[in-house]
Image (cartoon, rainbow, N blue to C red):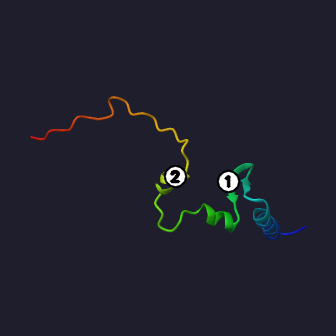
Amino acid sequence: MSSPAFDITTRLADLVEAAAKEGPQVVTKDGVETAVLVSITEWKRLQPAEGAPLADPLLDPKGPHDIYIPLRGRYSHRPPIKFE
């Protein structure tokens, strides 16, 4: 019977190899999806460019254009407060 540390190390090595070859691997704990292991290539692809603001993907002409933005209601503006 192998020790628990060896068993975990072996499984982790298999998981890392699968992530590199097959794509993201879901990790569960007690039957509940807990984490995802991705290859370093995929991780770098998912990271925003250095110093790129969050709005860049939304302003990109090739970006998502199917985002529904609800119209503002007629009560969307409050009258200005007058201080005396």
Q: Quadrant of the C terminus?
A: top left
Residue at the top extreme of this rendering:
74
- Quadrant hosting residue 80: top left
Q: Secondary structure at mark 1?
A: strand
Q: Please name the residue that numbered disc 2 is placed on.
A: 61
Q: In the image, what residue occupies the spot 32% across and 30% down?
A: 75
Q: Nearer the viewer, mark 2 or mark 1?
A: 2
Distance from the alpha carbon under mark 2 to that under mark 1: 35 Å
In this figure, what is the number of numbered marks?
2
Give the crowd class for mark 1: few <14, some 14-19, many >=20 residues within 10 Å: few
**Mark identifier at residue 58:** none
Sequence-first disc among 2 and 1 = 1
**Is residue 11 depicted above or below 81 in this figure?**
below
Residue at the left extreme of this rendering:
84
Camera-side residue: 74 or 65?
65
Q: Amino acid at mark 2?
A: Pro
**Mark identifier at residue 34:** 1
